[in-house]
Image: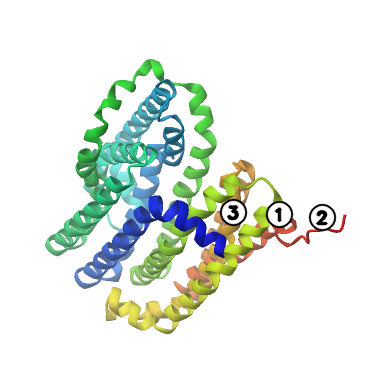
Amino acid sequence: MKKLIDYINDNVLIKITSLKTASVITRIIAGILTSKAIAIFIGAEGLALIGNLRNFVGSAQAIATLGFYNGVVKYVSNFKDDLHNLSKTLSTVFYFGFISTIIVSFFCYFKADSINDIIFPTYNNYGYIIKIFAIVLPFYSLNMFSFSIMNGFSKYKILIIINIIGQILGVSIAVLLIYQNRIDGALISVVIAESIIFLITLVGIINRRSLAPLIQVKQVSWTFLRNMGPYSVMALFSVVILPLVTLVIRSYIIENVGYKDAGFWEAMTRISKYYLMLVTSLMAVYMLPRFSEIDNIKEFRKEVWSFYKAVMPSFIIGLFVIYLFRSYIVAFIFSKEFEPVGGLFLWQLLGDLLKVLSMVIVYQFLAKKMFWHYLVTEIFFLVMLYLTSIYFVDIYGAKGAVIGHFVSYLVYYAIVLLIFGSSIFRVDTNKED
């Protein structure tokens, strides 16, 4: 535990944690305010529709940016003093990202009505929302491109400011649109929120305008693109497929149980997202870089157990407190209409506990680029999540979705332990030799 605290104090707190902490806290507050506005002015049925749109938008944005973000941060950081390779990095990402974004934008714009029929069951008048999304998508891609450059150059202070201002601006626009236009306003805010932040990011990249000449077509590198492949595919797979699976499950609840119950499930997943942000942000800034440094099983086992001992007891206590005060939490974030959400907490919390336990180990996949291990386990989990959710929804209604969440992560964690079990639980016999 001391090593974890020392690492954070020496390496993370000064640089990255300040950014993550400010961003996470602001995002949680913004999310709660938006959820409250939705609960008051729209209700559970509207929340279900918003959830479906949010899932689609997240997947489309990830495809448009090709999952390049983490890879760009890494390579910009490595090549910031090497103009030749930096030019290849920026040129390759910019032009491939540009092509991908334009393709996704055109597809969304001209297939807006078809997409509307998929994500808004029985509602056929929101095609214009998809067209708005198609128009603003390039600004989102430019924003992420700019963010990755600033992150690679360790411009943490300006990123903190942009994140905080962006979240404040986003929630202000969302609440205003929801108040004035109800469900239409909420849907519009979902598709424009991330893109609007680019207006703020422009200020942050003015000092980096000298990088523009480095972005040249002749510097596009296929070798660099291949090196980015594992980062891109691993990022894309979970970021694209999981929201789509969630969308399908929610649509199934809408069609077979009802909009309100789908809205209750969406409310539960939102609450889950808020408290998970705290622990997952810590894991992202500590586990991934730490596992990248480790080159032997003994150190890997030591780090996993250190994190379990240092963080998991507090996390478990936090989950217990959340369960005890679930009715007050639901009333605070939403409204009395959402009281049935209290019945979904137990299975969601148990599933989230297993999720965090497994994520601690799964970061080894990402740190060591264990591409096929990551891909196979993710595919298995997503198939399990879909099948168990549908199965239990047929039996228990919306509650079945959170039961499916728990069962899926239980099996997923068991598989992860099978893969890494010998590394984590093996007794070190080197001293006896």
Q: How is the image coloured?
A: rainbow
Mark 3 and mark 1 lie on one chain; the one further toward the N terminus is 1
Classify mark 1: helix, strand or loop.
helix
Give the amino acid at mark 3. Answer: Val
Q: Where is residue 276 shown, x and y percent of the image?
A: 44, 64
Give the amino acid at mark 1. Answer: Lys
Left or right of 306 in this view: 186: left
Disc number placed over residue 362 in the picture, else none: 3
For the residue pair 225 and 422, the one nearer the viewer reads as 422
Write the residue at 46% across / 21% down: 221
Give the Cα separation between the discs numbered 3 and 1: 17 Å
Q: Is residue 80 above or below residue 338?
A: above
Query: In the rendered image, which quarter contains the N terminus?
Result: bottom right
Give the Cα separation between the discs numbered 3 and 2: 26 Å
Classify mark 3: helix, strand or loop.
helix
Give the amino acid at mark 2. Answer: Asn
Residue 383 shows in this picture: yes
Write the residue at 61% across / 53% down: 380
The residue under label 2 is 430
Give the Cα separation between the discs numbered 1 and 2: 10 Å
Q: Where is residue 357 shown, x and y percent of the image?
A: 58, 64
Classify mark 2: helix, strand or loop.
loop
Circle 1/circle 2 CB separation < 8 Å: yes
